[in-house]
Image (cartoon, rainbow, N blue to C red):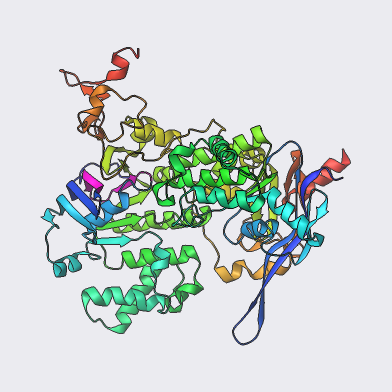
Amino acid sequence: MTESKEARHPVLKVRDLKVYYETPKGDVLAVDGINFDLYEGETLGLVGESGCGKSTAAMGILQLVVPPGRIAGGEVLLEGHSLLGLPENMLRSIRWIKLALIPQGAMNSLNPTMKVCDQIKDVIIAHEGKRARKDIRQRILKLLATVGLPGRVYDMYPHELSGGMKQRVCIAMAIALNPTIIIADEATSALDVVVQRIVAQTLLKVKQALGVSMIMIGHDMGLMAQMVDRIAVMYAGKIVEIAPVADLFANPRHPYSQLLIESIPSLKERKPLKITEGITHDPRNPPPGCIFQLRCPFVMDKCRVVAPPGLEVKPGQIVACHLYQENKDGSMVNVANAAGNT
Amino acid sequence: MSQMLLEIRNATKIYTQRALGGGKREVVALQDFNLSIPRQPASIITIAGESGSGKTTLAQVVLGFTHLTSGQIIFDGQDMSTADARQMKAYRRQVQAVFQDPFGVYNPFYRVEHVFNIVINNFGLSSGKSARREMIEQALNIVGLRGEDVLRKYPHQLSGGQRQRIMMARAYMINPRLIVADEPVSMVDASLRASILDVMIRLKEEIGISFLYITHDLSTAYQIGDQIYILYQGTIAEKGNTVNVIDRPHHPYVQLLVDSVPVPDPNVKWKGEIFLPAEEEMRSSVHSGCRFYPRCPQRMDRCLQAQPPLYPVDTRDHQVSCYLYASEVAAEAKM
């Protein structure tokens, strides 16, 4: 974990990003105005149930949204420069060099007819131009060693590798050009626990060695607890809470975050199951006010009218919920508790 | 008559692959596997293991999708390999399945009610529209859904959790005694898994249906399972009461497995680093000795000679296939 605060400048700023999908019955608001910063060297987790827009947010950051999707507004600033509206050739030179993606089911994204070495070579040559064969070989072998793979993988085809090894080849490809930011979309979700642990540890080691920033998308809260520094909780296209990982687990503030934490199956004790439904409203037509109102156990009249703004209840912990209000003296108060819970 | 609902005796399943160049390659998916599920009380039996451990082969064998290379499956006292067509149909009715993929099992062109109509017609469960409707409604209520909310919908309009619960309702309607649930929650969102697990518990406790719950996820098994069998490359590594096995794992593989489950607490991090030998080395010792030998940190020469039998540890039904516990048995015998 990065304790030091000296170099806390954001490498990526996402401001009011909106990604909508067009359908005959109106736009699906997949990502509806999200804000966050990614600091240098940190790992940010992006969690939420399927359909909450977390993968779409990644595509929005990478400017890889394809029709019927479109970026409907907002800004993505990479080291201060806006990515929106850049011509495709500029974006191509940024992707992979600055912003690398480990896609969902990455192990199936390898080309089955190409050897591992040729696939990694493609990445290097496409972005840096031709290099001496010997140099490239050295570089690829070093990359494979970085992700903990033996040198003989160099000459192997994807089908000769296990799932975890393929996943690590994808990590090697992602770091081939020393990116500033890696976006890992469910990078370990299709793996067995032991292999998942190995891949996750590889990812952590690589991150530390290269000092890159990382956005980890997933829904496994256990994995998040192991890997990330800060965590952003998404619900139906909005970030409802963002906090340092320890604070979010110890003291989740948003009712949805609370529900997420409570529904983690434990290996420590048997407890009654916490049953919930999924996203219940039509994503084309979200209710006015708070996005979570239909499932919220603490819903108030205000929630049905006004969308709650983000409020920093604790340094670094920002919550979008009417339960929390700032007192005149600047202290925070939980409205429900203050009213005596009648 | 046997006291067991389902008995699997010495089940072995070998898949033969034809290798390039005419040679044959055998993959032992399941070897000398034994399992029994009592008639009473209903229970949830977990089969856990990583991919390639043979857990899905086991499900396929129990469901009759593939046949054993050797060994027996005995359901309600009847050896299924000698069953005639009528007995097979009865068996299919009593043993139902819920699969991993809640998206793939539906025909996207039909409304949800179609799923129920098919089984009612196939098994002749009811005649008359109102009786049929009532039957479906009751099944849906069991899984916490209402007919008017879901029946007229198309599969894509439902969440993964709802779809999987409808599959449970469908299975329930046929009034089975055993449901084989092959990874029923792995493709469903973590926050929605509880709704499916809850249905399993209720079907077990209220209706008396037993489950063969096949999963790679120890934490859900820990929450709902009665007995657990942890497989490693087609053999039982450890079995026993779920809470005992996971709280006090004995087999080195099971210890590694339990230890690798990410703890949902940022203050409790993974300890140490682990490495895996290459794929080909891991499968090499398949034909003799302990399957875990290539990866085992505590391996002994003895482990290569023969597959270790199941040794009891702490309680009688907690058993471990590992020579590390052979001495405990000897010590116990002296007492």
Q: Residue at x 57, y 56 (%)?
A: B50
Main secondary structure of the magenta stretch: strand
For this view, does A97 lie left or right of residue B52?
Answer: left
Q: Position of residue B161 (x, y in %)?
A: 47, 44
Query: A87 or A9, which lies in front?
Result: A87
Where on the picture, by quarter, is residue B210?
top right
Image height of A24 relative to B313, above or below: below
Q: Residue at x 45, y 50 (%)?
A: B111
Query: In which quadrant of the rendered image does the C terminus of chain B lie?
Result: top right
For this view, does A25 lie left or right of residue B169?
Answer: left
Does residue B181 appear anywhere in the picture?
no
Which range of residues does the magenta coloring cover? A28-49
Query: B3 or A190, which lies in front?
Result: B3
Query: In which quadrant of the rendered image does the N terminus of chain B lie?
Result: top right
Q: Position of residue A251 (x, y in %)?
A: 36, 29
Q: Residue at x 38, y 68 (%)?
A: A109
Query: A53 or A164, which lies in front?
Result: A53
Where on the picture, by quarter, is residue A84?
bottom left
Q: Residue at x 34, y 61 (%)?
A: A102
Query: A184 or B129, which lies in front?
Result: B129
Q: Position of residue B289 (x, y in %)?
A: 73, 63
Q: Position of residue A302 (x, y in %)?
A: 23, 24
Of all residues, the one furthest to the bottom in this rendering is B21
Does the segment drawn in magenta span residue A158? no
